[in-house]
Amino acid sequence: MGNKTLDGLKVVRVARMISLLPGIQIRVGKNHPFIATRSGAVPCPIASSTHVKNMVVPWIAQATGYNKKEIYSSLRFGTWQYT
């Protein structure tokens, strides 16, 4: 298992940044290193097999209402640009 996602982002950094969002928690999974959870939503796995732009960003956008391009840009640069 690698330490970067399919689109080259560090798994740990993505999980750490998602944990900063209101209403979203990160837990350790059995088959994936991290799983993003939110009340009433399907969990989102975060692992080296995850493509952040296609899987995680839409999940965050649905959970928060933020713009998908801004979410991905923030995850790539390592800081939330609008929270």
Image (tube, grey):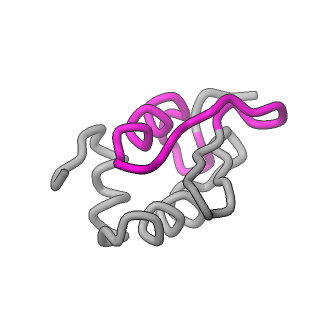
The percent position of residue 68, horizontal first and vertical second, equals 37, 70
Residue at 42% x, 68% y: name it. 61
Residue 79, quarter of picture: top left
- Eyeballing the image, is 12 above or below 44? above
Q: Is residue 45 magenta?
A: no
Instruction: Tell me: 58 left or right of 34.
Output: left
68 in relation to 30, above or below: below
Judge whether residue 21 is colored magenta: yes
Q: Which residues are magenta?
A: 5-34
Q: Is residue 35 left or right of residue 14?
A: right
Q: Is residue 18 above or below residue 30?
A: below
The x, y position of residue 71, in whole percent, is 34, 59
User: Which residue occupies the foreground of this view, 54 or 24?
Assistant: 24
Q: Residue furthest left?
A: 82
Residue 19 point in image, percent of width and height: 43, 38
Residue located at (24% from left, 46% from top) = 80
Quadrant of residue 2 within the rendered picture: top right
At horizontal 55% and vertical 53% (from top left) the residue drawn is 38
Number of numbered discs visible in the structure rendering: 0
**Residue in front for this viewpoint, 24 or 73:** 24
Q: Nearer the viewer, residue 62 or 10?
A: 62
| Residue at far right of view | 31
